[in-house]
Amino acid sequence: MLDIALKLLDEITSYGFQAYIVGGFVRDYILGIESNDIDINTNATPKEIKNIFDSCLPNEDYGSVTVIKKGVRFEITTFRKEMSYLDNRRPSQIEYIDDLYQDLLRRDFTINTLCMNKDGEIIDFLGGRSEIDSRVVKTVGNAKTRFEEDSLRILRAVRFATILDFKLDKETRDAIIDTRELLKNLSYYRKKEELDKIFGSSNAAKGISLLLDLGLDKYLELDNLDKVTCTSSLIGVWSILNVVDKYPFNSNERELIKNINEAFLLNNLDPMALYKYGLYVNSVAGEIKGLDIKNITESYNNLIIQSRRDLDITSDDIMKGLNKGPGSYLKDIYSDIEREVLYRRVKNEKDAIMTYIIKNYKVEN
Ligand code: ATP
Ligand code: MG
């Protein structure tokens, strides 16, 4: 991946422009972490980049261009200066500039300002390297000003501290506390994107205690955050937080959250609960309660049936046995025999099930 990127830099610079890999990729490279997207900055304008590469996807909103080379996505952004900010979030005006240093000054944290040139050499104008080595998240410039410009940076700071297991620099930390109420102006969509990364991290426990220590839970309207103790699953965290009415979730997430909260109220080793909600939902619900997942998995694997298809009987068999046509009565019979088979009161064998059905449902003429 790096070799493809360096070739791309070589190509851009062969036209007389400057071009560097910047930000997350360089940071992660130094830390030995694999990253899957590469950001490039250059003094070429988006138009000039489009003239160099045939296959570009323009990202009009941000004045950057995406180039895909050998299946790798490169986001190529022109050096810029962000002038003034609207709503603590969107720069109201962007000015393209010719100066790498100025471009680095607008970036959020020093650890995100390292560049790599086409020869693979690291360029460090703002001391980012020493902050990576000492594992510190520190804003570029005055912390309070930077958070006031863009309050998303507050959550990005927590995200990097969580994912990379870094500390927050003292001034950066104090400024987060000073400006935290600006989080209210941020869209729930943006907040969720960052929170997903924090809660989905293998170091989520640290992220959650950071959010609590910084008092951000109140401004993020996450009233249950202090109740999130022992779940390793992202959807488990959101289920405890129970904020589906505020934060945006897709229908799949909503369904899972609903089911997890229902399964939470049940005994997750009970055959009926396992059958109805399945292994995954019961495991997440069980984990929230501190149950041993091994036991849940074992109970699930011991179920006599895991779905209706596993019953050794068909609707046709039932209708024939009862001498009746189709009807909603079949649904009730199915629920009944599922339960009887799951609790091992009736064997999952056609004859046994049929005997049970005839005994309980046959109407003698
Ligand atoms: P990752 O891709 O691993 O999430 P990243 O550091 O690459 O992390 P991106 O969101 O891809 O983060 O942004 C690329 C670079 O753009 C960052 O490294 C940073 O230099 C800059 N950047 C991104 N968002 C902001 C922001 N809100 N304010 C200032 N600079 C930012
Ligand atoms: Mg990135």
Image (cartoon, grey):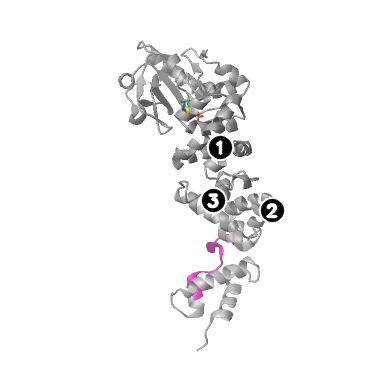
Q: Name the residue under label 1.
A: 198
Q: Which amino acid does label 3 sit on?
A: Asn
Work out whether residue 13 or residue 207 is closer to the camera in this orientation and state it.
207
Q: Estimate the spatial distance between the alpha carbons at disc 3 and disc 2, rounded to whole Å.
A: 26 Å
Write down the quadrant of residue 54 in the picture.
top left
Q: Estimate the spatial distance between the alpha carbons at disc 1 and disc 2, rounded to whole Å.
A: 29 Å
- What residue is at 45 percent from the left and 46 percent from the top? 248
- What residue is at 56 percent from the left and 77 percent from the top? 357
Q: Is residue 62 magenta?
A: no
What x and y, as percent, mark residue 203? 62, 36
Whichever of callouts 1 and 2 sits on the residue coming sooner in the sequence is 1
Work out whether residue 217 or residue 159 is closer to the camera in this orientation and state it.
217
Q: What stretch is highlighted in magenta?
A: 303-318
Whichever of callouts 1 and 3 sits on the residue coming sooner in the sequence is 1
Q: Is residue 311 magenta?
A: yes
What x and y, as percent, mark residue 126? 52, 16
